[in-house]
Amino acid sequence: MSPSAVFENSSDQASVNGNSVTARDEPYDLVCIGFGPASLAIAVALHDSGISRRVIFLERQPNFAWHSGMLLPSAKMQISFLKDLATFRDPRSYFTFLNYLHCKNRLASFTNLSTFLPRREEFNDYLTWAASHFDDCVRYGSETQSIEPTLAKDGSVQCWSIAVKDTHTDEKLSFSSKNVVIAVGGFPKLPRALDSFGPKIVHSSQYLKIVPNLIPNSGKTTRVAVVGGGQSAAEIFEDLMDRYPNVHATLFTSSSALKPSDDSPFVNEIFDPHRVDEFYSLNLTDRQHTVKSNRATNYSVVRPELIDRLYEKMYHQRLHDADESHWQHRILGSRELTSAKEAADGRMTLEFADTGHGGRKVEEEGFDLVITGTGYVRNAHEGLLEPVRGLFESGPSNVDRNYRLRLKERARGCGIWLQGCCEQSHGLSDSLLSILAVRGGEIVESIFGNQRNELKSSITNGAKGTHRTTHTNAVSALM
């Protein structure tokens, strides 16, 4: 039985059990904007709760995809597989990574690897497997453009109207719901020195989709600049060295050297789900200090084993030629990108401030391609919420502990929850996988807590011989 069977269905509701999705005047109980890991965790938690509600997920991409541009052949996860969609909330869930392995008949083989860190492509396959169970509840190719309040005669908010564009047909659609979760993820961050991405300037998120087509197979030398000092930039630099013998790659980082990430056990505790409570209870100054002091766990840092591999590759070049300027691949630190321009021959010229020597200007010429591993911005919710601005209690990111946006009194009969953009209020784990399972459960509890209590009551009565709900049977049948 499909897990989506626990979501309420009707003959004209398009979101479950194989019917096509259409907009309806009757509001949904929940609309989730975006269907990445955050919304998927909510779907799993809602399924596991046994609560039956009218829910739809709106996703801009044509199908489920998680960092598809960075699924490098050798890349491994940086966190334990136990930090999956369900285990920390309920290890008995159907949607744990271990049950995925069991369903794929790989549990014994994976165990023989003696690792907590699967390849990234395998974890992506796990997420895709989980997402496939909710296909009836997801409308792919749907780009949300705005969220507006629908007002009653007394000025109170009756529901939210979500304006959507079909990315295949450009058709305009509208969905309404009393509750909305915004989980649209991050968007590529452009370095300050660059005007825009283009044919010769590519963000790391598009690496596997675009770069292989830009590097000729003729054996002609292709010069590539990689800008960034974090894990993505380092992985791309290594991949260029390993897979493209005709590429001459240079990694430019603003720090003096590549810095290792700190994933020691005591430090890793900052990503434990219960630490969100501690962080949220801090005042603004202490929150900012905590984020800054722990940035080495997540920002502009590289896994130590990757640093070791890169250093060994640099050393091997030194073995054959002591002059670094002759090397095919180089790592240059203390380089802050200040400008980029296309030369007459079509190649890119990059200008850097050498921060190790007083900021003097340094030009690097002749690059066929520039790849930026400069992270993401997580403020897309602000644009979506522009029509709601007049209802903000104090700003577009001021949320309660349960991630609910703080709105004025007349809007409190409806709710908006934010996911993946609450680092300043909920800590460094907010945009990471570490808390997905528990947070998904918290969101479901926040929105549908009353229904959960009613379900528990009906189950108790059923155990005493009164009745048992069909939703509980559906969950049991799936386990």
Image: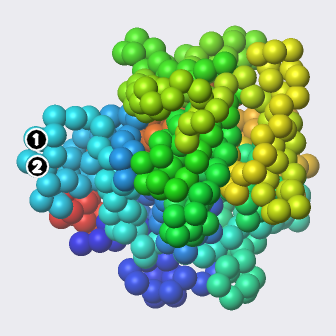
Is the residue marked by circle 1 packed among few (<14), some (14-19), or many (20+) residues within 10 Å?
Answer: few
- Residue 358 lies, with reference to residue 337, above or below; the image says above
Q: Which SS class for mark 1?
A: loop
- Residue 200 lies, with reference to residue 249, above or below; the image says below
- Residue at horizontal 34 percent and vertical 59 percent from the top: 125
Residue type beneath disc 1: Asn
Question: Which numbered disc covers residue 109?
Answer: 2
Residue type beneath disc 2: Ser
- Residue at horizontal 80 percent and vertical 19 percent from the top: 355
Q: How far apart are marks 2 and 1 (CA)?
A: 5 Å
Q: Locate residue 315, reporting x and y percent.
A: 45, 25
**Image quadrant occupied by the N terminus:** bottom left
Q: Locate residue 274, reporting x and y percent.
A: 45, 23
Question: Which numbered disc covers residue 112?
Answer: 1
Question: Do the residues bearing badges 2 and 1 touch, measured as CB atoms within 8 Å?
Answer: yes
Q: Locate residue 198, reporting x and y percent.
A: 77, 62
- Residue at horizontal 71 percent and vertical 27 percent from the top: 254
- Residue 250's image quarter? top right
